[in-house]
Image (tube, rainbow, N blue to C red):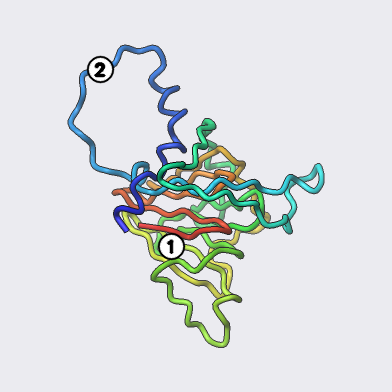
Amino acid sequence: MEEFWKFTLTAVLATAALTACGSQETPAADPAPTTSIVAQIPAPPQVTIAPPSNAGGYSESAEAPTVTSATAADPASNTAPITPVDPAMYAAPNDQVGWKSPSGNIFCKLGSTAFSSGCQATDAPIPDGADCDKPPFSADELSKGFFLDPGQVTPMCFNQGAFGVQDARSLDYNTSISFNGYTCYSRVEAMICDAGSGHGFVLSMQQATWN
């Protein structure tokens, strides 16, 4: 698993890092920092999401993305800049923030109590280690996703909406939201969330991976 997470968000934050550096002189090298999710989650495969079906937003029933697999020799290279959003725009009851992916497949929420933070997808693979034995429901009938806790990710299958927010607003692609120590990134490839201490997950129709 450690090997699998080797190259996660390098492409996701590459452009942001270059922008932050600007034209300043390169400082003396500091000791190597603790490895974080930025360096551990592998870049998700390149996908193309169906365009909006109307001017009002993304279609809730978009066709399945076309996938181009990424390998270690040919990694996904999405270097579009990430723009942080104001979490107040996504405020939810009980001091939480909540949103959905532009495709409508993924719903997420970040809070301050146990089991209040994470994401779930209507259509996604079963994450390794997830408990999907929830009779009378079959695994195919369950949504898949993860709970987030500080420095920890728990894979899960859900028989109800754990992270739904009424009138959820879309978190646009190439933006990020930070709240209560967590940060999630909305990419066309996947929703990527950082729990801190080198732990996080990647969730999409094609993958549900974590460390």
Residue 180 spot, x, y in % from top left: 40, 48
Mark 1 residue element? strand
Q: Amino acid at mark 2?
A: Pro
Comes first in the chain, label 1 or label 2: 2
Q: For the residue marked with disc 1, what is the amino acid? A: Phe
Image location (x, y in percent) of residue 17: 41, 27
Q: Residue at x 35, y 13 (%)?
A: 24
Q: Secondary structure at mark 2?
A: loop
Residue ranking furthest to the bottom? 136
Q: Which mark is residue 98?
A: none
Q: Nearer the viewer, mark 1 or mark 2?
A: 2
Residue positioned 80% across, 48% down in the render: 53
Label 2 sits on residue: 27
Work out whether residue 20 or residue 169 is closer to the camera in this orientation and state it: 20
* Alpha carbon separation for disc pair 1 and 2: 38 Å
The structure residue drawn at horizontal position 47% and vertical position 82%, both measured from the top left corner, is 133
Which quadrant holds residue 151?
A: bottom left
Residue 147 has which mark? 1
Placement of 30 over or under 88, stated as above or below = above
In this view, the residue in front, 27 or 114, is 27
Identity of the residue furthest to the front in this view: 73
Residue nearest the observer in this picture, 194 or 89: 194
